[in-house]
Amino acid sequence: MNPLAITLPHYLVVSGIVFGIGIAIALSKRNAIAVLMGIELMLNAVNLTFIAFSRFGSAFGPEPTQPLVGHVFVVFVLTVAAAEAAVALAMAVLVYRRRETVDLDRINLMRW
Amino acid sequence: MTSIGIAIGFYALAGLAIGSSLLVFLTRNLLHAVIFAILAFIGMAGLFVTLSADFLAVSQIMIYAGAISVLLVFAVMLTPYASRDNGNSLFAPAGVLVGLGFAALIGFIATQVAWPAFTGGDLEAQNFTGTVRTIGSALLGDYALPFELASVLLLAALVGAIALVREDER
């Protein structure tokens, strides 16, 4: 295999690694804002997968049947990510105002 | 896509994205973590460029590296007495294991599955003029309803965020 050929698996592996790092951050960080950063990294990795499939799939093919549907999906993911970040950060500020901390280990009011 | 430029660009940008993401996990200071997250977003935007997604790369830089990172910095600054360290909780080993497992699973699938042989054709041969026109007509054509729903979602999120953090006048 030509080492200069960049193909679909290359992008999928990069996206998988970034997604894994995002999961590790979201599951193991103590600060709520750091957890949010992990979630944003995961959304980013998914966007890369969408665009890679769009590029190497049918969209740019010899006979493009559904041009750039992956790109349209990424636009919606960006929209939802922006809304999610705004609401989550508002909640972080609200929790901080009530309890003087954003440490997820100490926000345990609803623990059973 | 077989050219030395694409190969160099891909490996450099992939290294930037993965390395910055790792540093978000490893660094001890929360603000440094935000900076590395911005770098990771920029590396991702570069990867979008290597995939000929020009409009999405610019949107990525504007929304992620611009707006969302400013929101993150604001959130860090608005919680002044909270801990600034980017520490791990007790579940860190389990979280790292789950992340490694997911990365290994996706990597295994990506390298084992026989993907279609089409490997990203020459765009100039197909009179490729850019993605903006196609995305625009798709958003206002086939995807008009999700597009309007997305605008309602953004409005709801905006109003919700303002209502959440508003101080009571009482």
Image (cartoon, rainbow, N blue to C red):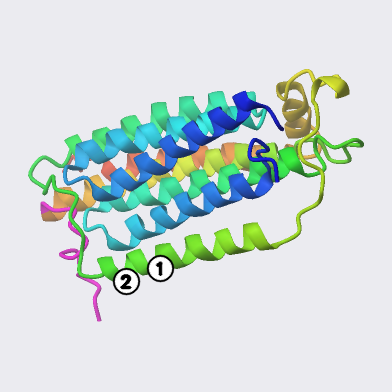
The quarter of the displayed image where residue A79 is located? top right
Q: Position of residue B95 (x, y in %)?
A: 33, 66
Residue A90 seen: no
Q: Position of residue B128 (x, y in %)?
A: 81, 21
Secondary structure mainly formed by the magenta segment: loop
| Residue lying furthest bottom | A112
Quadrant the N terminus of chain B occupies: top right
Amino acid tagged 1:
Val
Q: Position of residue B59 (x, y in %)?
A: 54, 27
Asked if residue B83 is positioned above or below residue B122 in the image, the reply reads below
Do badges 2 and 1 share one subunit?
Answer: yes
| Residue lying furthest right | A63
Asked if residue B169 is positioned above or below residue A108 in the image, the reply reads above
Q: What segment carries the magenta color?
A: A100-112
Q: Mark 2 lies on which chain?
A: B
- Labelled pair 2, 1 in contact (Cβ < 8 Å): yes
Which labelled disc corresponds to residue B98? Answer: 1
Amino acid tagged 2:
Ala
